[in-house]
Amino acid sequence: MFGEKKGVKVNAETFTWKKNVIKVEGDYFTTGGTLVNSRIPVDAIETVVWGMNPLKPTVIPKVKIIGKGTVLAEIPVGLDIINDVQDWILEYAVNHRRI
């Protein structure tokens, strides 16, 4: 689905890399591991973007999950897999939206 990358495991309801996981639990995306822990309703997700703040001392890219005109969650992700994470979240949210 997303090509083989070292330490990355992807299936329909989980995306794991290193010690981090984004998974679907019922009607929510949950994150765990060394990430910021969050729980986001799948139906609230409108889009997913990513970006970096070059003004901070350590430039860490983050996936931003957006819904209802606000950022619902920011998930730090490495540049090597950030597009894959974004695509996986968007694909799941669009295919499982009940609104």
Image (tube, grey):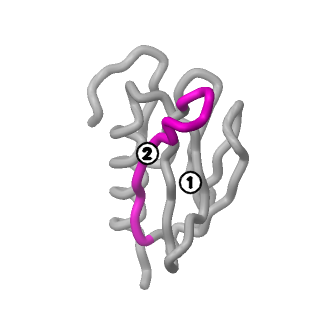
Q: Badge 1: few (under 14), some or many (20 or more) residues near its Cα, within 10 Å? A: many
- Marks 2/1: CA distance? 23 Å
Residue beneath the point at 51% across and 79% down: 68
Asked if residue 96 can be seen in this view, the reply is yes
Residue ID for mark 2: 51
Q: Quadrant of residue 70?
A: bottom right
Q: Main secondary structure of the magenta part?
A: loop
- On the rendered image, what quadrant is the C terminus found in? bottom left
Image position of 27 with respect to 22: above or below:
below
Residue ID for mark 1: 24
Start-end of magenta stretch: 46-59
Where is residue 78 shown, x and y percent of the image?
A: 48, 28
Instruction: Based on the picture, tell me whether residue 48 belongs to the magenta stretch.
Output: yes
Residue beneath the point at 56% across and 65% down: 71
Judged from this view, the residue extending furthest toward the top is 6
Residue beneath the point at 71% across and 31% down: 34
Q: Is residue 68 left or right of residue 4?
A: right
Image position of 41 with respect to 88: above or below:
below
Judged from this view, the residue extending furthest toward the front is 55
Image position of 9 with respect to 38: above or below:
above
Q: Which mark is residue 96?
A: none
